[in-house]
Amino acid sequence: MAEDKQSTDERRRVLEMVENGTISVDEATKMLAAMEEADAERHPPARDGAGKWIHIKVIDESDKVDIRLPFSLVRVVDSFIPKSARKEMEEQGVNLGQLADMLEGAEGGKLVEIEEEGGAYVAITVE
């Protein structure tokens, strides 16, 4: 049952992001559809027996993103990261598609953490 509550909480966060103007209704619809698809798929458990989650946190002058979602949705998230933050990540050599490929066998922990003097911050963690 914990997964059901967690799934509900993630959906609630998406709706709060719409309410706060962080993402558009169209973006939320795509995220929610992807969550439904991920819920419908039965993935085998991670090698260590625990489900994997990815936590992406991006902060810059005008944008703030703080998302925790099932690993199966990593590739979907890339389309929701603000362009300015994505550009910053790319300049630092961070590509979510490549990370998703590398994470298949990852144990967990912080993978990327970038802080700049201007206040920009990016962190990607596997839980």
Image (cartoon, rainbow, N blue to C red):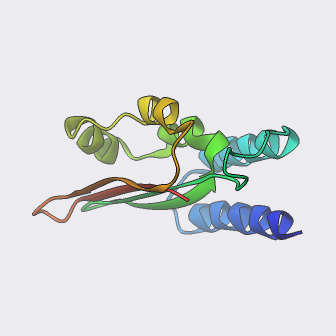
Q: Position of residue 95 (x, y in %)?
A: 37, 34
Q: Against 89, is 23 above or below?
A: below
Q: Against 100, is 122 above or below?
A: below
Q: Quadrant of the C terminus?
A: bottom right
Q: Quadrant of the N terminus?
A: bottom right
Q: Position of residue 32 (x, y in %)?
A: 73, 48
The residue sitting at 55% across, 38% down in the picture is 105
- Report the side of 64 relative to 62 (left or right): right
Q: Quadrant location of residue 121?
A: bottom left
The residue sitting at 60% across, 61% down in the picture is 18
- Report the side of 88 relative to 126 (left or right): left
The residue sitting at 50% across, 29% down in the picture is 101
- Choose between 4 and 118: the one closer to the eye: 4
Q: Quadrant location of residue 92?
A: top left
The residue sitting at 60% across, 45% down in the picture is 27
- Choose between 19 and 10: the one closer to the eye: 10
Q: Position of residue 7 (x, y in %)?
A: 77, 61
Looking at the image, which residue sits at the far left?
A: 117
- Choose between 43 and 87: the one closer to the eye: 43
- Choose between 121 and 48: the one closer to the eye: 48
- Report the side of 101 relative to 120 (left or right): right
The total number of labels drawn is 0
Q: Position of residue 60 (x, y in %)?
A: 27, 60
